[in-house]
Amino acid sequence: MYMVMAGDRIKELRSHLKVSQQQFSKRIFISQSLLADIELDKQGVNERIIHLISTEFNVNKNWLIFGEGDIFYSEKPDIRLETVIDIFNQLDEELQDYLLSQAKFILKLKKERIDKIQN
């Protein structure tokens, strides 16, 4: 897992969206105090927080991590993906792991089906 110092960009994003630290932190499931530490670069952000910010606010991960490109993606992500992410975030870690294992199993079945059709 990596940690990124992105406090200035997150503060800029919040300002652009015109949302408070409390509103922003609530939408990405972290405490307001953690967000304050992130914005002051006392704390880095991990992959999970990067993903949550990107998904919740339609933010370009490249911009968030490296400061490159546009702040926002030009197209809104698929609503089905947002629904899956919302469900995933409401589960405890054990159930998240179970959901991931089931998704991987379904993907494996799909690949096997494609291989069977091609052969």
Image (tube, rainbow, N blue to C red):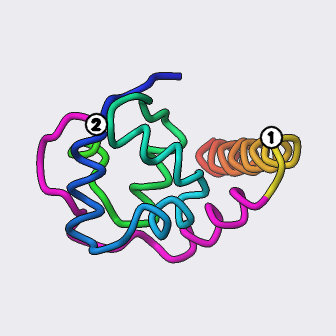
Q: Quadrant of the C terminus?
A: top right
Kind of element beneath mark 2: helix
Residue plotted at (73% across, 49% down)? 103
In the depicted view, which residue is nearer to us: 69 or 30?
30
Residue plotted at (72% across, 65% down)? 87
Q: Which residue is mark 1?
A: 97
Question: What's the residue type where badge 2 is placed?
Answer: Ile
In the depicted view, which residue is nearer to us: 91 or 114?
91
User: Residue 64's spot in the image, x, y percent?
Assistant: 27, 44
User: Residue 77's spot in the image, x, y percent?
Assistant: 40, 69
Residue 14 position (above or below residue 9): below
User: Residue 62's spot in the image, x, y percent?
Assistant: 24, 42
In the rendered structure, which disc, 2 or 1, sits on the residue that comes first in sequence?
2
Residue plotted at (65% across, 51% down)? 117
In the depicted view, which residue is nearer to us: 99 or 31?
31
Labels 2, 1: front one: 2
Q: Is residue 86 magenta?
A: yes
Q: Which residue is mark 2?
A: 65
Q: Residues within 10 Å of mark 1 (few under 14, many from 20)?
A: few
Residue plotted at (88% across, 41% down)? 94
Magenta-highlighted residues: 65-90
Residue 5 position (above or below residue 25): above
